[in-house]
Amino acid sequence: MISMLYLMNTKGDIVISRQYRDDVSASTADTFRQKIVAAKEASTSAPIRILDSSTFIFTRHLNIYFVAVTRSNVNPSLVLEYLYQKIRVLQAYLGEKFTEDKVRNNFTLLYELFDETIDFGYPQNTSIDVLKMYINLGKQRQKIAEDQGSLTSQITGAIDWRREGIRHKRNEVYIDVLESVNLLLSATGSVLRQEVTGSVMMNTKLTGMPECKFGLNDKLVVEKDKNSQHAGKSGVSIDDCTFHRCVSLGRFDADRTITFIPPDGEFELMKYRVTDNINLPFRIIAAIQEDGQTRVSINVKCTATFSEKLFASSVTLKIPVPSNTAKCKIKCTMGRAKYVPEESSIVFRLKRFQGQSECMLAADVTLMPLVRAKAWSRPPLSLDFSVPMFTASGVHVRFLKVFDKSGYTTNRWVRYITKSGSSYCIRI
Amino acid sequence: MSQARGLQNFISDLRNAKSKEDESKRVSKELANIRSKFTASSSLSSYQKKKYVWKLVYAFMLGYDVDFGHAEVVSLVGSAKYSEKQVGYVAMSLLLKAGDSMMNMIVNSIRNDLVGSYDDAATSLALTSIANVSGIELMQALHVEVQRVLVSPNATPAVRKKAALCLLRLIRQLPDSIASADFAPHIANLLQDRHYGVLTSTMSLLIGLTSKHEQEYETMIPYAIHILSTLVLKKSVSPDYLYYRTPSPWLQIKLLRFLQYYPELMSSGEAYVATLKQCLARILNDTDVSDSINKSNADHAVLFEAISTIVVFGDSGDEDLQLAAMRLLGKFISVREPNIRYLGLMTMSRLAVLHNNTNKEQIKTFQSVVVHSLKDADISVRRRALDLLFVMCDQTNAESIVDELITYLVAADAGIREQMVLKIAVLAEKFATSKKWYVDTILKLISISGDQVSDSIWHRVIVIVTNNSDDDLQQYVATTMFDVCSSKNAHVKAVAVGSYVLGEFGFLIAEEAGKSGEVQFQVLHQHWPLIDTNTQGIMLTAFAKMYNLYEEIRPIIDPIFAKLKTSVDVELQQRSNEYRVLGSLGPEIMEDILREMPAFDTQKVSTLEIALDQEHSDTHDVNVFKKKDSEAAKRGSKVQQLQQPEPEILIQPEPEPDLLGGFDEPEIAAIVPPTPPPGNKTSVTCNDPAAVAAGFAKLLSTPQGVLFQNEYVQVGVKQEFRGSQGRVQLFAGNMCRGGDFTNFKITIPEVPYLRTAIQDEMGATNPAGCTVSPKQQARLMIMAEAIAPYSEAPAFTITFETANATHSYPLRLPIVPTSFTEPVTVDKAAFMGRWGQLAPKESQEIVTVSRTVDSAMMQQVAALLTGMKYGRCQEVDSPTTCSGCGTMKTGAKDGQGNPISVGCLVRIEANADKFRVTARTLHPVVSQGVKETFCKALKML
């Protein structure tokens, strides 16, 4: 299990540390500093390293390394997940972009959180709202004594993610469907790999202990309700999905209905993956020709295929050029394009890209002749974008029903965003 | 360096980069900038050009790929300004590699700087970069110019120095680029230069040249001695070249080192010899210990070089000098300074190798000091002391030195132990006063440092004990080993020796009280659980020998063998099984096999000597000493071989699986080959083709057997085939009790359808042949792969000469098409289907056998079929037919790269005393080959 945790800045100084077990010493921090931080390896090396028979599992948030040290054979994904949760918790307490100074100024809070989230190296509760009930910035400390009993039942009870007696003036639910598209197209335009990973984020502000029922246009569900008003429409076939632990899986297995008592505040209700019938938001035709040793001519056409009522924002197209590029003459119909030598590519940016429109880019690249001629590897062209109110998989929310004893009405807000995933590439 | 702000910024950006990516981003941005500048149409200013090239050089040194900008480098090299030239040359020596196309362009610029320019700085830059780039074409293009610069009368000393060193670099890469005979006068000229810098560089060059061509530069000796006398005797040197009041120690050392190439110098009787003696005497006598470390270092360096020179001159040199050197060395090996002690010991051991008796005696007086150095804190000093002790050892002091070494071995640390053990073992053997002492010494070694005692050391003990059957050594050793093994804590190696010795010679002491066979057995067996499996194997053999000798312990040993039948270790399993069965074969056979080991072969070089030799041959330096050392070592080992030709150990307690087992049978021993009158050799060949055919046919379906045999020679084969590949071991044994086979040769002509590789330990396939003694075997391992379908078995010939006849036996290897077959089982329908399809490629023959075919014979035929690795297809057979199916695998590849295999179907039909053999395969040649193979085999039924 985790023997020691520390937060380290980019110079390798420890900002704060907590030791949970005696099998590692504080000198391991020196090892980490020398071998990883000082060697400028942290950004390139693997997140798990074994040095001097201690295992270092680390991640980085802004300028702070979160490092877990262990000597035992731990489950690495458990430790990494804990580190991510830890960052999330700290963001909730110290703000989205917390800095080294902020950590130092709140070190008592940090130690409380360290102690509450891990016990003898085993990760414990990292739920923000539960933690917030008992650990806060010192304003409501006295209340804890009274709540001692309820604290236990809260953490060990059947519904440990939600406490009773929550009240909101206005009952609201925000639903965000976020999708990211990964794509690999061959030079001839055939699809080599395509995949949409989506997640449904919820932010609930509901009174009491409401039970919610949530529905997507899942193919299996849609086909089952043939006689309902949705008959005739085909749903989306979801390859696989995972749920937040508040969702009752028994009900889902029985009739694929998603029912749950939500935690208060923000959480990720479900994640899913779709690989069939994907609506690609952009079509790209690239012609890149090498004319001899010293010239490359590039012509790229990009068409937005989604409805003209929508628009894509922050579209970035990276067109690779050889590493010995000397000069680029670029012409484009809209947006801005320039040669970025660090990435050896032409970066073409569009702030706003209307649906059904198209843009063109033509570039004339002059190369520096090399002493030892090397063939250009022609790396793939990549695209970065986000399209609001569009889902590449076609998933949409059919309903969200909220049942509570008091029978209040709920306002529901739904939002869709499709982004490019980690790789949206077209080979050239 | 130029004051380039951009360059400084670039460097500081890179050094402040937080991560590797930041750095590489910055570099690629900068490189892009430089690319765009270099391709820009407007020409760059001198400042810009320099700045960008410096940046390229810096990025290149950080490990980034820089493969442009070479044109700019070339233009900088060709520029007239020094500052530009300098940048150009630096960049060139870094960025350009030998073989670049830009090289040709740059050679002209360099040549201009070298010859055409009157600017020393430019010439020096050119010389430096030639030495540093060192591509072959650059050297070939420019070595003439470099020589010209070196000998040019108007070159300044600085340029000459550089030219000499540059030329040294060139001759190291292209040793033959200088015509030595023509060049010597130039060197002579240079040696008359007044400038000591030039002299020092020239001496470096001269040493480089002399190490390759000694004779050509012999005429330089007077010049060298003259310079040496100026430095040593007159001490007339410009103050610039005084190093802590020592006149140019480097030059002195180089001169002395040069003189060391001519060891016969002193006896040449030339006038300069006296001067040289004077110089050496002066160096030896006038060097005094100084307070200044630097002064003392310089002086000692010169002094040791002088002593080395005296050592090289050896016996031809001056006695007084040698004595003085010896005296000094004696002083040095006891001083506090470890460096000097180290050098003292090393030089002294060189002196000791010289085989000069006065030296030897002299050195012996320092024995106690050297032994003391063995306990030095510094391991390298200890090593040197060990070396010295090793070489100073002889008959008279061997015992005391070996005793000292053994005492020290107890305390020695692991780093040096192995070397010590080896050296002690060699010394003990070389200078043994008695065999008993030798055995005792090795036993002591084993008990002190058993882990470092390599197998070859204790094998050697056993060879010596086994080969000395006349005196009471064997009995003595048996007693000693009995005592050693009686202790519970005996080392594994000691137990190994003990097992062997008690197994072989235990009977010599079995009569003594308390040492009966049973007790001996108990003494060994108590170690059983603690020893490794190799030693267990040796012990098992000892048990077998005891089993043979002492009736009474058979009941104890039997269960041990029985238990080991299921041992995890295959070797133990096999041994125990064989020994167990041996007991049941009858007392004569057992006694015969478990008889005492014969004396070992005494022709081979001792493995210990080999191990020592390997230690010596670690570097190939041009240094004269290394050459001498290794020569001396070789000489030493040869001398020893002549004195005491000792065998290498071949412990094979377990008899070979008895393939050619005829050797020990008395009937064969009785055969004495007919002895025709000596002088005219008759020629003998196979006189019984039927026997040859029978041997061949038998091997077609069995994995091992005798291929051919007569009263002289027995040829056995052991074969193993898997798919398209096979391994055939060929044994040819000398059955002739009369004498050696000389000029023994096995000739295997290559055939196109087999790819063969031959392992030959004895050299029997060499054109010169080898010698096979009586009862010996020549072994050959043939790896064969079928690469095409074929029908003919490959031929080979064995030829040799005995005292009175030349023999020649043309035979065939049993590598036939069916050897590469793998069985295939098919059902009736499939067989008949294929049989029909392959009808056009049929090959058929009728064979007549000696008797009428009956069912027993048909069973033999079926066994033959499976023996040849055909899958029997019983469904299609009647009582008088036998059919089989297989595929012949070849290593040849078809168009897709898959190995080709040929399906084969065979049918043998019997009728009265005839067999009809029908082979149908995909390939007509194979059909024929398969058919012939079967016919041959059937004829022998």
Image: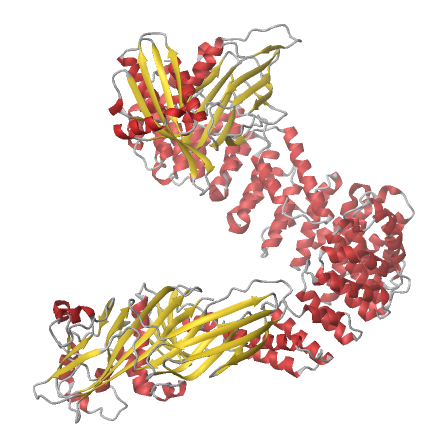
B316 and B657: which is toward the camera: B657
Q: Report the number of numbered marks.
A: 0
Q: In which quarter of the image is residue A260?
A: bottom left
Q: Give left or right: position of B681 versus A103.
A: right
Q: Is residue A13 visible?
A: no
Q: Residue A349: horizontal and vertical position, in percent? A: 46, 81
B505 and B810: which is toward the camera: B810
Question: What colour scheme does the image use?
Answer: secondary structure
Q: Residue A380: horizontal and vertical position, in percent? A: 46, 68
Q: Residue B630: horizontal and vertical position, in percent? A: 68, 42
Q: Give left or right: position of A5 versus B184.
A: left
Q: Residue A270: horizontal and vertical position, in percent? A: 23, 74
A105 and A363: which is toward the camera: A363
Kindly identify the residue that appears in the image at 14 percent across and 88 percent down.
A207
Kindly identify the residue that appears in the image at 30 percent across and 20 percent down.
B882
Q: Give left or right: position of A75 versus B622.
A: left
A405 and B889: which is toward the camera: B889
Quadrant placement of the N terminus of chain A: bottom left
Q: In which quarter of the image is residue B700?
A: top left
When the figure is inspected, residue B537 is found, relative to residue B24, above or below; the finding is above
When the figure is inspected, residue B940 is found, relative to residue A30, above or below; the finding is above
Q: Give left or right: position of A141 versus B15.
A: left
When the figure is inspected, residue A284 is found, relative to residue B906, above or below; the finding is below
Q: Can residue B493 be seen in this view?
A: yes
